[in-house]
Image (spheres, rainbow, N blue to C red):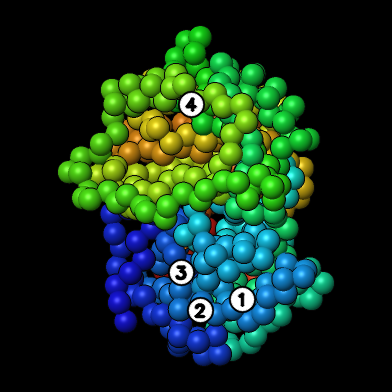
Amino acid sequence: MRRGGVSWGRLPGVEQRLLPVTSRHQPLPDQPSMLPWGNGRSYGDSCRNDGGVLLGTRTLDRYIAFDPATGVIDLEAGVLLGELIDLTLPNGWFPAVTPGTRWVTVGGAIANDVHGKNHHRAGSFGNHVLDLELLRSDGAVLHCSPTAHADRFAATIGGLGLTGLIRRARLQLKRVAGPWLRGDSQRFGSLGEFFAIAAESERDWEYTVAWLDCSATGGQLGRGIFIRGNHAPAQVAAAAQAPGSGRLRLPFTPPVSAVNSLSLRAFNTLYFHRPSAVARDALWHYRPFFYPLDAIVDWNRMYGPRGFYQYQCVLPQAGAVEVLTDMLRRIGASGLGSFLVVLKTFGEQPSRGLLSFPRPGVTLALDFPNRGERTLALLEALDALTLAAGGAVYPAKDARMSAAAFQQYFPGWQAFAGHVDPKFTSSFWRRVTGSARR
Ligand SMILES: Cc1cc2nc3c(=O)[nH]c(=O)nc-3n(C[C@H](O)[C@H](O)[C@H](O)COP(=O)(O)OP(=O)(O)OC[C@H]3O[C@@H](n4cnc5c(N)ncnc54)[C@H](O)[C@@H]3O)c2cc1C
């Protein structure tokens, strides 16, 4: 039994015990308050269970079957996406959807129904889950799919680990020619330009994403860099050289956040104007393309010992320029933003989960160093804008949204609550439903 459960935002710790699940055939421990824990890449408290037990799932790391002819893989839920890629890419298969880090488990990817740069084409992770096996605290094992226990399946996709332990899953992977992507990048000067490039890119480009300069003001507000790519054909792949697997490590946690408004403005200006921001026919290895931050181990320590918040919202497309403009003005005026700002359109493909975050529109994600009340007040103001626009905030990134906000963002929450395992709970769930600690 170990202490555990740090989430990616490194906000001040809570007391909880980590009990590794040693075999998928093992029953759950007899504990009144449990929550599965993947690899702690959620930023806030959705992967925390203050005062309770976390079920460590990284030990569920076995492959059960892989068919290189069809790209269907059957595996335990603690396998990391990066490990899966190492196994299947040499056979020409890649996850149909991947988030911005490969250090997430399959179980964690299902439980947050994660999205990637191809949402407009492929929807979210849950759209590619063929079936899964769920262990409940009463010992029942449910084989769930869109046709078997369909309501429990819908509750478990994006179900925040609350419906039981996902022991294994079968996934449909995507056929690719190799590890390379071909594409381009360009600057845009405004949010209007961003939406025009996004709309024009969606037909021909599988992956699209933009970096946004959140310190820009006045006529420069809404400027950024748009990146798009497709998996490269085999002949391009054959000629290219894979990057080394070396990674940098942030050697220590600075005593205060290394991110402040002066360093941010200077950095963003340089980043926006650097010559390589514009690339015509670029060739990227999949690792820097999908996982640029994975190259720096423990980059989350740069925000200092108080940690940081991430705010990620989705807004309906209609009216999004006005709402984003308002948000960026407030963020700029607060001096609290950070370098890591992502803007991306979501497509129309419906998510399968009762509590899934992705929905049609545009999503903005950015980090904020934890400066206490100042940061919380800004995030409340952003929430008010998201609520008024009919949008939602992503639970995987959240550590502070109010119960009222959550319940408006996720109107299916009461139907979902009926699927929660009586012995499963999380710090997040208690906060957003006002339920008591078990
Ligand atoms: C650098 C970075 C980039 C990111 N980019 C994206 C992105 O582009 N898109 C996106 O959607 N997300 C993104 N994320 C968030 C991340 O993908 C999700 O938080 C993901 O769910 C984390 O997976 P994990 O294995 O670390 O799970 P954890 O964070 O440990 O847990 C996440 C949830 O899954 C549940 N869970 C874990 N395993 C199981 C299981 N076996 N059975 C049942 N429930 C389980 C937990 O209870 C918890 O509710 C990013 C995170 C980082 C750090």
* Label located before the other in sequence (3 or 1): 3
For label 3, count other residues whose C-alpha is less than 10 Å away and answer few (under 14), some (14-19) or many (20+): many
Image coordinates of residue 306 in percent, x first then y, are: 26, 46
Residue labelled 1 has its Cβ within 8 Å of some atom of ligand 1: no
User: Which element type, helix, strand or loop, lies under badge 1?
Assistant: strand
Pointers 4 and 3 in contact (C-beta within 8 Å): no
- Residue 75's label in the rendered image is 1
Residue type at mark 3? Trp
Above or below — where is 233 with respect to 223?
below
Query: Which residue matches tag 4?
Result: 276
Point out the frontmost of discs 2 and 4: 4
Residue labelled 2 has its Cβ within 8 Å of some atom of ligand 1: yes
* Label located before the other in sequence (3 or 2): 3
Residue type at mark 2? Leu
* Label located before the other in sequence (1 or 2): 2
Query: Which residue matches tag 2?
Result: 60
For label 2, count other residues whose C-alpha is less than 10 Å away and answer few (under 14), some (14-19) or many (20+): many
